[in-house]
Image (spheres, rainbow, N blue to C red):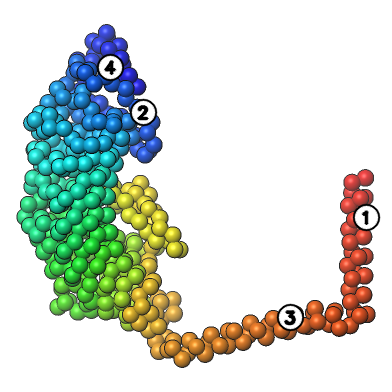
């Protein structure tokens, strides 16, 4: 698209100079529109709201924004922009309520110097090539998506003091290490906490009593450890406390860590749980029979339940990794407790509970022996009972093949009659 030419034609009608809102937001990830703008073009308008998604503006950061110092919303998502955000953009002294430059190939210093003045401001730098320590913004930022970058080092221990009003925090798929900060408990409005696919270690801190609004918790694919407690006094690990502290929880993903101990029966009080994944840990003991009766596993969520979550979740379904985004996340019901080798033989499923102790090693070996024996006997009797007699008895063999020839001739004759 020749943007300069398009606006030149509009200027004849006298509308261009008053243009304040440009919205070309395409939900598809496929580029549907490419801008062809000369580097020296100066727009005759001053935008306040710029929202583009899946529109090619790159490869460089768009230079025609040099004089756009009235911008309040800047969304350049999936715009094929590479390199750094230029210094002149920071010198515009913008008063923003949203910055979304996700799904590009941006590098350099994250834009932490930008000012956010709205009480509910949004920052999205997801799916870029940013490196270095995890950046922080002003306290009025409420949604922060830094996932799918190369940020490294620990999560700042004072993140909860710096950004106490966060409602959505996604730090997944980075190179973060260290422990989970206790100060996250200061984020009393937090509804989404996704810190999966990093190198975090240690136990989960005691901050759950302040996170009563949390409905998505994803700490999967880290090196977290500690037992899953069955008594409320062990608040430092994974939850018996969940039912009391975060009753709104819909999604709980702790797969691929090093958690030990038993699954606490109190988890069954979380009747709204819609997706539970505790697989690939070191859990032992019995599976609470009531876990199969969770109401949330039997009903679909509504759009409203997940409309605020803008990220993506990867769910393992029948050995395949399937990625779901906000648009279809509410359709997914899943319970995965697989691959916990701590004591898998003592676990019981909700469908056949009460069989503890019947799957000792010796019992498994005996069952395997009888399975192999029955297969061998079945093959011997089936093969030699039919094929063996035809090999040994010539008269039976001639009768069998004669019968097959007669049936073949009858079938050929029937087909020929049908064709006539």
Q: Which mark is residue 413?
A: 1
Badge 2 crowding class, 10 Å Cα cut-off, few under 14, some 14 to 19, many 20 or more, is some
Which marked residue is nearer to the observer: mark 1 or mark 2?
A: 2
Q: Give the mark nearer the N terminus: 2 vs 4.
A: 4
Q: Position of residue 334 (x, y in %)?
A: 38, 63
Distance Cα–Cα, label 4 vs label 3: 81 Å
Helix, strand or loop at mark 2: strand
Q: Which mark is residue 4?
A: 4
Helix, strand or loop at mark 1: helix
Distance Cα–Cα, label 1 vs label 3: 33 Å
Q: Position of residue 216 (x, y in %)?
A: 26, 58
Which residue position holds label 3? Answer: 382
Residue 217 visible in the displayed image = no
Q: Are marks 3 and 2 in contact (CB under 8 Å)?
A: no
Residue 262 placement, left or right of 293:
left
Q: Nearer the viewer, residue 256 or 24?
A: 256
The residue drawn where x is 14% and y is 22% is 67
Q: Quadrant of residue 210?
A: bottom left
Which residue position holds label 2? Answer: 33
Picture quarter with the N terminus: top left
Which marked residue is nearer to the observer: mark 1 or mark 3?
A: 3
Distance Cα–Cα, label 1 vs label 2: 65 Å
Q: Give the mark nearer the N terminus: 1 vs 2.
A: 2
Q: Quadrant of residue 111?
A: top left
Distance Cα–Cα, label 2 vs label 4: 15 Å
Badge 3 crowding class, 10 Å Cα cut-off, few under 14, some 14 to 19, many 20 or more, is few
Which marked residue is nearer to the observer: mark 4 or mark 1?
A: 4
């Amino acid at each position: 698209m020749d943007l300069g030419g398009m606006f030149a034609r509009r200027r004849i009608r006298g509308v261009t100079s008053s243009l304040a809102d440009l919205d070309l937001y395409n939900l598809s990830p496929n580029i549907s529109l490419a801008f062809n703008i000369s580097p020296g073009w100066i727009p005759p308008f001053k935008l306040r709201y710029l929202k583009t998604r899946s529109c090619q503006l790159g490869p460089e950061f768009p230079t025609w924004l040099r004089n756009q110092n009235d911008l309040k919303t800047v969304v350049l998502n999936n715009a094929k922009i590479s390199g750094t955000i230029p210094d002149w953009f920071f010198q515009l002294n913008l008063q923003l309520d949203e910055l979304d430059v996700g799904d590009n190939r941006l590098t350099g210093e994250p834009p932490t110097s930008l000012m956010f003045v709205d009480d509910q401001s949004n920052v999205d730098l997801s799916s870029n090539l940013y490196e270095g320590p995890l950046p922080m913004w002003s306290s009025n930022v409420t949604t922060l998506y830094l996932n799918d970058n190369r940020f490294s080092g620990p999560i700042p221990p004072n993140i909860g003091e710096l950004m106490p009003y966060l409602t959505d925090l996604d730090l997944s798929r980075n190179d973060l290490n260290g422990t989970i900060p206790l100060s996250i408990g200061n984020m009393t409005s937090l509804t989404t906490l996704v810190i999966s696919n990093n190198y975090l270690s240690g136990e989960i801190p005691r901050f759950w009593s302040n996170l009563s609004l949390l409905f998505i918790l994803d700490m999967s694919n880290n090196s977290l450890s500690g037992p899953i407690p069955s008594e409320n006094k062990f608040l430092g690990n994974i939850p018996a406390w969940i039912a009391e502290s975060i009753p709104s929880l819909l999604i709980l993903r702790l797969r691929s860590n090093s958690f030990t101990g038993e699954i606490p029966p109190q988890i069954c009080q979380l009747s709204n749980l819609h997706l539970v994944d505790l697989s690939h840990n070191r859990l032992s003991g019995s599976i609470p029979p009531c876990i199969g009766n969770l109401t949330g596993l039997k009903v679909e969520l509504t759009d409203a339940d997940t409309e605020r979550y803008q990220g993506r979740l990867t769910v393992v379904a029948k050995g395949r990794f399937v990625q779901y985004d906000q648009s279809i996340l509410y359709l997914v019901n899943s319970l995965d407790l697989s691959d916990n080798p701590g004591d898998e033989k003592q676990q019981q499923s909700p469908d056949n509970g009460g069989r503890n102790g019947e799957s000792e090693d010796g019992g498994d070996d005996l069952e395997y022996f009888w399975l192999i024996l029955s297969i061998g006997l079945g093959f011997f009797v089936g093969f030699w009972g039919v094929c063996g007699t035809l090999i040994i008895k010539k008269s039976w063999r001639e009768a069998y093949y004669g019968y097959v020839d007669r049936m073949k001739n009858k079938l050929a004759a029937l087909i020929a009659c049908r064709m006539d």
